[in-house]
Image (cartoon, rainbow, N blue to C red):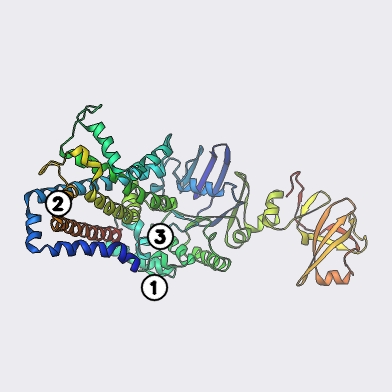
Amino acid sequence: MSIEVTGLNKKFGDFVALDDVNVTIPTGQLTALLGPSGGGKSTLLRIIAGLEKADTGSVTIEGVEATHLPAQKRNVGFVFQHYAVFKHMTVAKNVAFGLEIRKRPKDEIEHRVQELLKLVHLSQFAHRLPSQLSGGQRQRMALARALAVEPSVLLLDEPFGALDAKVRKELRDWLRRLHDDVHVTTVFVTHDQEEALEVADEIVVINEGRVEQVGTPDQLYDEPANDFVMSFLGEVTHLGGVSLRPHDIELEASPQLAGSVEGTVSRMVRIGFEVRLTVLTVDGDEVSVVVTRAHARAHGIEEGSTVWLTPAAGATVVPRMAAAV
Amino acid sequence: MIWFSALVLIPLAAVVVTAIDGGWDVFWTTITNGQTAAAIKLTVFTAAGVTAVNVVMGPLIAWVLVRDRFWGKSVLEVLIDIPFALPTIVAGLVLLSLYGTDSPIGIDIANQRPAVFLAFLFVTLPFVVRMVQPVLEELELDVEEAAASLGASRFTTFRRIILPSLTPAITAGAALSFARGVSEYGSLVLLSGNLPFKTEVTSVRILSSIENDNVAGAAAVATVLLAISLAVIVVLDLIQRRVAARG
């Protein structure tokens, strides 16, 4: 196992950033640390990189006990949200920095820099300054710089957070393809569940300093461990004491299924092929339901109609927490 | 451009013109006069020495002010600016009472060369500090962290990442500090005693020329100072370019 984190605790003053975190990150995979802002995921990443010191607990990287190693000795590549470019150096010099520190021969450095710039599609910008690049290009340069030293793990802290939506999406796809080529163990932090679901092999959901669940995107979506994971990964509504996805509710115009709950449609919005309904049940719940346009039309549903709701067979259902989101 | 000319170029040209008006002979005899040459030498070397001290101490003080948290920091922030705010003759008075013949701390450097050095040091202290400080504040921590994660030691990070970013500010501060040193009058006039060949600086020399109705002589000295200041600014700019390019 590539990165092993055991019993990690970290406090900033009174604020508990990490609360007894245990995670194992597998070799060669692309893992996402997913969670809301301030949940501790960036702190965890920074502790793995050695940029932050844990109060207690240990970190092992590729079998090497790294808890007390300084960042310089951990051989990790780190990519920052705001690129952290060396402004006064050209793109090529930026990428070469780690190799020059390691006193590699000049021609080897030159060769490797060219190779990396080609990999991140920046060959023609080698002699530009970072200030002459766009945000996306700067981040690709930062990635090449981190990869140059052949790190045992690559850590990315909200790497696409400062980019606009379109570039973000492109870079996301590109990172996935790059990882398929390079195969370095990669961990990236994100608060965007779509990004995590789309890119990662494995997702670690972190909230309030604790690991809520670890699993593949499908596992997390289909078998969320609790209400938090479920609501963080997609839309959630509550029906009769359970949490479930709005599209996992069966809606009928008459009570046909056992255990169905009666309610009145209070709001109806049509978006393209789907129809979003808000139903007030006789139990006092306000339930969101998503059905297809065809289904709504077939059952003659409109605002004010009386309907019966049942959790669909095979639906992902989680008992509702007291502090439901 | 007109504004700039009126403020800077015309007075500078006037000085040079006055010096030329006096004729080449006056110019040459003035600046080769032993007393004047000694004054120019003292002023330039002391100003250069003080600037060298400031180039080292200025960034250090700025670093402490930006990166460290300690009790009394805001007081120190204000103290740094006192040489800016204080009329220089008051500074001279303070220095005289502290390092003069009746020094309460037992250091008597009145009428000696260290007095000139000390006075220059006092008035030029804020320049490099205040030039470097905002640049240091703007410097992003993650850049240093990036260097560290790439394997750079603290020293290498400072030399290859931080220093090149600070160089323009240090150079600008050094130029200001040198120019201020060369032109200083008020703060040293009391403590140094203005002894010819020993502690007399050029500004004092220019004043005495004027008092003796030797305007051409004063202008000649001023022109030499002008040329030296210009040369220093050019040299500093070259150094800055070199360091910035080396990164």
Q: Which residue is mark 3?
A: A145
Would residue B1 be seen by someone viewing this image from the given angle?
A: no
Residue A8, quarter of picture:
top right
Q: Which quarter of the rendering shows the C terminus of chain B?
A: bottom left
Q: Is residue B83 left or right of residue B23?
A: right
CB of mark 3 within 8 Å of CB of mark 2? no
Q: Are discs 3 and 2 located on one and the same chain?
A: no
For mark 3, name the chain.
A
Kind of residue sitting beneath label 3: Arg
Q: Is residue A182 left or right of residue A301?
A: left
- x then y, percent, for residue A26: 53, 52
Say what secondary structure mark 1 lies in.
helix
Kind of residue sitting beneath label 2: Ser
Position above or below: B242 against B119: below
For marks 1 and 2, give the one nearer the viewer.
2
Mark 3 or mark 1, earlier in chain:
1
- x then y, percent, for residue B66: 41, 45
Q: Which residue is mark 1?
A: A124
Residue B167, quarter of picture:
bottom left
Say what secondary structure mark 2 lies in.
helix
Q: Which residue is mark 2?
A: B209
Along the viewing direction, whichever of A91 and B61 lies nearer the viewer: B61
Kind of residue sitting beneath label 1: Gln
Q: CA distance from mark 1 to mark 2?
A: 63 Å
Say what secondary structure mark 3 lies in.
helix
Which residue is pictured at 48% across the width and 61% down the height?
A: A183
Position above or below: A123 against B142: below
Q: CA distance from mark 3 to mark 1?
A: 16 Å
Q: Are discs 3 and 1 located on one and the same chain?
A: yes
Q: Is residue A56 left or right of residue A300?
A: left
Task: Please rate how many residues cluster around mark 3, counting C-alpha atoms within 10 Å: few if below 14, some from 14 to 19, many from 20.
Answer: many
